[in-house]
Image (cartoon, helix red, strand yellow):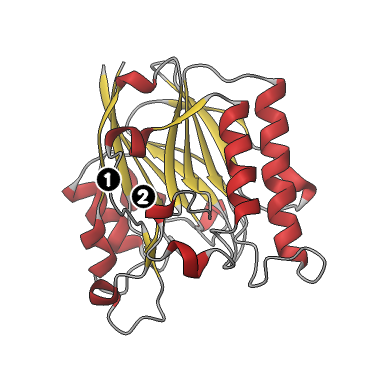
Amino acid sequence: MTFTLATWNINSVRLREGLVAQLMTDEAPDVLCLQECKSPLDKIPVATFQALGYTHMIGRGQKGYNGVAIFSKMPIEEVGAADYAGLGHARHIAGRLSNGVTVHNFYVPAGGDKPDREINDKFGQKLDYLTDMRDAFHAARPEKAILVGDLNIAPREDDVWDHKKLLKIVSHTPIEVEHLAQVQDSGAWVDVTRQDIPQGNLYSWWSYRAADWDTADKGRRLDHIWATSDIASAAHSSRVLRHVRGWEQPSDHAPVFATFDL
């Protein structure tokens, strides 16, 4: 079967209910993974999304912060929700689709402003979170799985608008990139987006601080779709929906898509 999956940091699912509904209507992915929902699960406008065909949902909610959810047209069974680094945050949910594929949806901590865990606890929490992800996937090697989400790291030089200027900026520092690479290696994950789009600048996030984000184009690729090596070759048609960043009252992230033939 063929199915399309999308990931999107929505930056408040209740505030941007209409944008989620628009994406579901315009693009109709079979599975939509949201991060930073900023809502308890019982406050998410599920009825709106069910009316558009997304009759299945799993997630973890948190009032005002974090939060992850998976909306699916196919049946999905929850199979895990890990509290990496013991933060008590709603940052991970995993579900198994009716086709046997397990989907991990992550919202990795942003890490604060200073890339130094000695003076910035949030940066230390981010590194610890990634370390726990690495150890978990090393202990239980995933198969037939997809990992998506706002991983809050742009790993490649062409995943940021200026590699040299951002080397000391949280999200692109060498230590973060190395930690993310260890997570990827531990699960034999393949970066599906870059498998499909191997060359060229590619971004999924543009700061609200830019007066004209599109013209300035100071973006970063923080949002990712990975697949285990046993199914990565079935992925295709990867794309970032850049124009969604220009919708009215948008999230600062754009949705990322991939299609799988399984």
Structural distance between the alpha carbons of marks 1 and 2: 6 Å
Quadrant of residue 66 within the rendered picture = bottom right
Secondary structure of the residue carrying tag 1 is: loop
> Residue 49: x percent and y percent?
33, 48
Q: Position of residue 7 (x, y in %)?
A: 39, 45
- The x, y position of residue 152, in whole percent, is 53, 55
Q: Are marks 1 and 2 in contact (CB under 8 Å)?
A: yes
| In the depicted structure, whether residue 116 falls above or below residue 139 | below
Q: Residue at x 47, y 17 (%)?
A: 144
* Left or right, 185 with reference to 149: right
Q: Is residue 129 left or right of residue 215?
A: right
Residue 84 coordinates in the image, percent (x, y):
72, 43
Q: Which residue is outermost to the bottom?
A: 211
Query: Residue at label 2?
Result: 47
In the rendered picture of this protein, how many numbered marks are placed on residues?
A: 2
Residue closer to the observer: 249 or 210: 210
Viewer-side residue, 147 vs 189: 189
- Tell me the kind of residue under disc 2: Ala
Q: What residue lies at 73% left-to-right and 39% top-to-bottom? A: 132
Tell me the residue that label 1 is attached to: 51
Residue at (43, 53) in percent of width and height: 157
User: Which residue is located at x 41 percent, y 73 percent?
Assistant: 207
Q: Secondary structure at mark 2?
A: helix
Residue 104 to residue 83: above or below: above
Badge 2: few (under 14), some or many (20 or more) residues near its Cα, within 10 Å?
few
